[in-house]
Image (cartoon, rainbow, N blue to C red):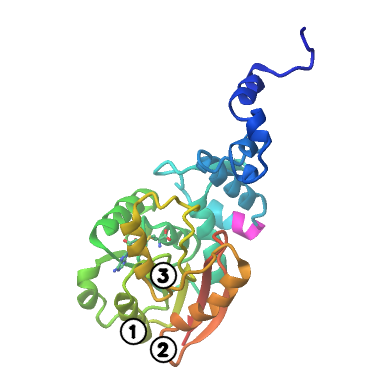
């Protein structure tokens, strides 16, 4: 008998493969498994891009007007083909959303026009790009590992106009002492990289900041995690061990528990204070990752 409101060929397939009588009889684990993944969009195993785009879209939907202005001033954001969504006619990706949130936090607490900036560990250079596009930065020095530094040089020469690119200096870690000798900076920036260095290296950089900088902006994880459901430890147990051994904050916490993160953020504030004469002039959770904190210190 033909049933007018019967299942479509798509649902026939689902009923035969996922929503089977045996599967629906079992409640244990069904919400985080194959059955529920067909009732919602929750299949975490295959929907990485969907989740990233949904998160990006939601952040774009709640972006403040001043942050839209900051984002629009950063040209050539699509170089390198980011995973992006379109909102208000603008292409929006996670890298530059984070950059405008970070810039907002810094700009509210530190003078940026006319500033000399030192960034340690700049990745491809999104923060540098965002700062130079929004403020009259006099000089921007990046200290990084040689290969990443080349990526930043390559990328920033493509996205920045020549008159801004010439304000940059690229310093490989081996040449830090020589190239930075005698220089003073209004601001040092470290985003998502102190936590990946040895404790000795972080100590070295904090002492450099203490001697040569007026302010420090840090945005890093407050601790480590071991929840295998988050990434499947796909890079292998050795890489997990390496990640657990780096940085100043190595306590393993539940990174999706806001109270655990807030408690650990007190250790974060102590760990990154460059020296005795420094005070924290602002701190908060760093959107969007649950376990990142940001702080700005001044002497
Ligand atoms: C996860 S990436 C973050 C990049 C960038 N700050 C961002 O948020 O997009 C870590 C950065 O730290 C750099 N790095 C790693 N070890 C370093 C070291 N010993 N000294 C300076 N930079 C380092 C890496 O090359 C990379 O640029």
In this rendering, position of residue 144 left or right of residue 287: left
Q: How many marks?
A: 3
Please say whether residue 3 is visible from this viewpoint.
Answer: yes
Q: Quadrant of ligand 1?
A: bottom left
Q: Which residue is mark 2?
A: 275
Magenta-colored segment: predominant secondary structure: helix
Q: Quadrant of the N terminus?
A: top right
State how far apart marks 1 and 2 are (Cα): 8 Å
In front of the other: 223 or 299: 223
Q: Position of residue 120 (x, y in %)?
A: 35, 69
Mark 2: C-beta under 8 Å from nearest atom of ligand 1: no
In front of the other: 131 or 17: 17
Q: Which residue is mark 1?
A: 207
Q: Which residue is mark 3?
A: 190
In front of the other: 101 or 48: 48
Q: Earlier in the sequence, mark 3 or mark 1?
A: 3
Q: Which residues are magenta?
A: 64-68
Residue 18 lies in quadrant: top right
Secondary structure beneath disc 2?
A: loop
Residue 81 within the magenta-colored segment of the rendering: no
**Which labelled disc corresponds to residue 120?**
none
Secondary structure beneath disc 3?
A: strand
Q: Earlier in the sequence, mark 2 or mark 3?
A: 3
């Amino acid at each position: 008998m033909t049933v007018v409101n019967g299942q479509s060929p798509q649902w026939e397939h689902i009923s035969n493969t996922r929503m089977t009588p045996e599967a629906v009889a079992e409640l244990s684990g069904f919400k985080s498994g194959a059955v529920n993944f067909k009732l919602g969009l929750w299949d975490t195993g295959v929907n990485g891009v969907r989740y990233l785009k949904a998160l990006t879209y939601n952040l774009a939907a709640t972006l403040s007007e001043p942050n839209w202005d900051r984002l629009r001033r950063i040209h050539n954001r699509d170089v390198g083909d980011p995973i992006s969504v379109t909102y208000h006619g603008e292409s929006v990706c996670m890298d530059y959303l984070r950059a405008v949130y970070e810039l907002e936090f810094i700009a509210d607490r530190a003078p940026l026009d006319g500033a000399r900036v030192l960034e340690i560990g700049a990745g491809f250079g999104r923060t540098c790009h965002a700062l130079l596009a929004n403020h009259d930065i006099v000089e921007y020095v990046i200290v990084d590992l040689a290969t990443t530094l080349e990526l930043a040089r390559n990328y920033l020469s493509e996205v920045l106009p020549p008159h801004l690119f010439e304000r940059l200096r690229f310093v490989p870690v081996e040449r830090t002492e020589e190239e930075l000798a005698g220089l003073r900076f209004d601001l040092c920036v470290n985003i998502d990289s102190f936590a990946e260095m040895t404790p000795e290296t972080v100590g070295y950089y904090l002492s450099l900041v203490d001697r040569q900088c007026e302010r420090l902006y840090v945005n890093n994880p407050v601790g480590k995690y071991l929840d295998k459901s988050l990434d499947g430890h796909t890079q292998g147990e050795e890489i997990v061990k390496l990640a657990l051994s780096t940085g100043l904050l190595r306590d393993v916490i539940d990174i999706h528990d806001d109270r655990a993160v807030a408690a650990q953020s007190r250790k974060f504030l102590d760990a990154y204070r460059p020296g005795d004469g420094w005070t924290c002039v602002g701190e908060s959770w760093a959107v969007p990752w649950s376990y990142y904190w940001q702080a700005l210190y001044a002497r």
